[in-house]
Image (cartoon, rainbow, N blue to C red):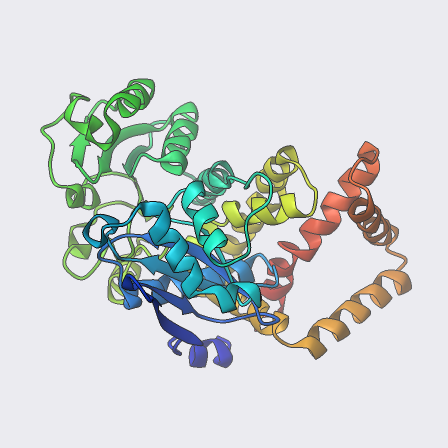
Amino acid sequence: MNHSYVDQKNSPPNLVMTVSDGKLGEIGYLVVDRTVAGSAAGGTRFAQDVSIAELTSLARSMTYKWAFLNVPMGGAKAGIFADPGQLGCKRSELMEAFGRGITSLVQKNVYYPGIDLGTTPDDLHAIMQGAGNPLVGEQIDGSYATALTVFETIRQVSIFHGWDLRGLRVALEGFGKVASSVGKMLQNAGATLVGVSTIAGTITSSNGFDFQQLLHLKELFGDDFVHHAGGSEVQSPEMLYSLDVDLLIPGARPWAINESNVDDVKAMWIVPISNAPTTSAAEAKLNERNVQLVPDFVSNCGGILSMNMRSHDFHLDDVDQLISTTFAGMVFDMLTKSAQRGENFTQFAREIAWRNHLSMTSPEHRSNGARKKASRLILNKDWDGIKQRIAYRAHRRQSQLNGSIHQSALARYAEMTLGEVVHQMDAIQ
């Protein structure tokens, strides 16, 4: 295993700060784990019990996620814990105050905020307004693309292990945009949703729930729909982790699976929607029991992949195509190579991501690598590779191009991002 990864994995973040307002007092935190070219990005969550420890773990997950996709950005995460009701202010005023508190970091492009647990597009607009950098235009919703990578990861794990999605028994945590989309995709593939939880509790059904009915009830009752869905008696939200299922999909707060409940987990495999779903100690125990745990930055990377692709003028159809082809093949190859090496899949993926991060933070390595790759294409007369580079440049200048050039540009984008995962897999000794 790469020593730089081992040395750095427990290292502290670059920046931890308490965000204060002259009128409201202390209102939140910001953690910048690592920067690339001086910048980091990650969502801002809104929860009264948010802690620096939680944000530190989540910020590291963001570093892994950007690095895994080979997108030049570091990881960060912010949290607002103040209660506007207790402070006697409007929610929008609290968000603007938080923005004012991080103004210098936002305006210097050190931190790019985003939507996260408990925050909305309106909140993000208020934060950026307070930071003096108002958002312009419609913001990209990456929830569907996140669901796509979660589902595609599940599909590739099932193919690798020779399991059939049809009849697979699933426990799903949460029922927001991402979770409900994942649930729908799994049901369409023939899986059976036997357990679902919200903050209001867990319900189970041995025969599986009618997914459309759950969606309808969610529209009517919000998270309290679990009290109207039939099935079992409503139990605590934490009961979901101990259900006797094939697949567990954590989708809420970090460290949901920890030392207190890891021995109760019965699922054969865990594919998270949420970031940092397990503690380190719980992860070690799951590995000892050969429970297949997929790292969060692999399964839920679709959101930032989608946003990055859209910022490069690709379309939602392109996102769908890339996830169902290049991303799918890459996940299967990672499963195969980690098994061949006798290495834990999660640790293998982390090492790949960290190698990408080190590459992105080494200007000499990146420039030399780009030159060597271009020279190799010419010397080997790799005309497809050369065409993709030319097409990508044309795409960047003008997005409305013919289908052949557009597809070549998409192939070049795939090579620059997910293609680096393949490169790092081959480089690991």
Q: Which residue occupies the foreground of this view, 236 or 89?
A: 89
Location of residue 98 in the rendering, given as x and y in whole percent from the top left corner: 38, 59
Q: Residue furthest front?
A: 23
Is residue 343 something one can see in this rendering?
no
> In the figure, 264 relative to 234: above or below?
below
Q: Residue at x 57, y 48 (%)?
A: 305
Q: Nearer the viewer, residue 106 or 44?
A: 106
The quadrant holding residue 322 is top right
What residue lies at 12% left-to-right and 27% top-to-bottom? 232
Q: Is residue 207 above or below residue 309?
A: above
- Rendered-image quadrant of the C terminus: bottom right
Count all numbered tags in the image, as a single digit. 0
Left or right side of 155 for 268: left
Horizontal side of residue 153 vs 253, given as left or right: right
Residue 154: x %, y % from top left: 43, 41
* Residue drawn at point x = 25 percent, y = 24 percent: 208
Whether residue 150 is visible: yes
Q: Nearer the viewer, residue 202 or 40?
A: 40
Looking at the image, residue 150 sits to the left or right of residue 135; the answer is left
Q: Residue at x 26, y 56 (%)?
A: 82
Q: Position of residue 420 (x, y in %)?
A: 64, 60
